[in-house]
Image: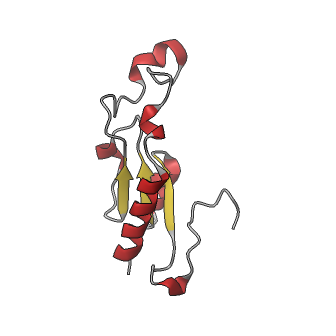
């Protein structure tokens, strides 16, 4: 499996379904995976979670911070798509532990 692969390598015999789950940001591949009926974990930083998930097989993760959902709108005219805090706290606060818990829930649900 290549490092760029969106699938999590789980063996079929470990009680976790077929091991296919997409993990990615709110971008085209996440929406495509939902259309293909693949289990998904969407990482939502500056984008609005309510507009990004359309499948009952998808879970969204986000950091509960004041600027969540800003979509970097306040800086688009000045610097492109830059964070107003220049630190992208919304993505940095989504921890690997949060992702692993979501993967575990999806894999248990997929059985």
- Considering the image in quadrants, where does the C terminus appear? bottom left
77 to 102, vertically: above or below: above
**How many numbered marks appear?**
0
75 to 6, vertically: above or below: above
Which residue corresponds to the image point at 57% horizontal and 65% vertical from the top-left?
A: 7
Image location of residue 88, percent across then percent down: 48, 31
Q: Say which of 4 and 33 sits in front.
A: 4
Residue 78 horizontal side relative to residue 5, left or right: left
Given the current orientation, which residue lies at the most extreme bottom position? 13
Which residue corresponds to the image point at 40% horizontal and 43% vertical from the top-left?
A: 44
Given the current orientation, which residue lies at the most extreme right position? 2
What's the coloring here? secondary structure
Given the current orientation, which residue lies at the most extreme front position? 97
- Considering the image in quadrants, where does the N terminus appear? bottom right
Which residue corresponds to the image point at 66% horizontal and 56% vertical from the top-left?
A: 4
Image location of residue 8, percent across then percent down: 56, 67
Q: Say which of 97 and 17 sits in front.
A: 97
Look at the image and tell me whether residue 5 can be seen.
Answer: yes
Image location of residue 64, percent across then percent down: 31, 39
Which residue corresponds to the image point at 33% horizontal and 28% vertical from the top-left?
A: 67
61 to 3, vertically: above or below: above
16 to 77, vertically: above or below: below
Look at the image and tell me whether residue 34 can be seen.
Answer: no
């Amino acid at each position: 499996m290549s490092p760029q692969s969106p699938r999590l390598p789980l063996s079929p015999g470990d009680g976790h379904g077929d091991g296919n789950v997409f993990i990615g940001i709110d971008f085209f591949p996440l929406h495509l995976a939902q259309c293909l009926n693949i289990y998904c974990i969407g990482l939502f930083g500056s984008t609005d979670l309510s507009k990004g998930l359309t499948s009952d097989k998808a879970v969204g993760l986000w950091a509960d911070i004041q600027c969540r959902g800003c979509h970097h709108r306040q800086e688009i005219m000045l610097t492109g798509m830059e964070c107003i805090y220049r630190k992208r706290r919304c993505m940095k606060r989504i921890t690997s532990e949060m992702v692993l818990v979501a993967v575990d829930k999806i894999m248990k649900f997929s059985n």
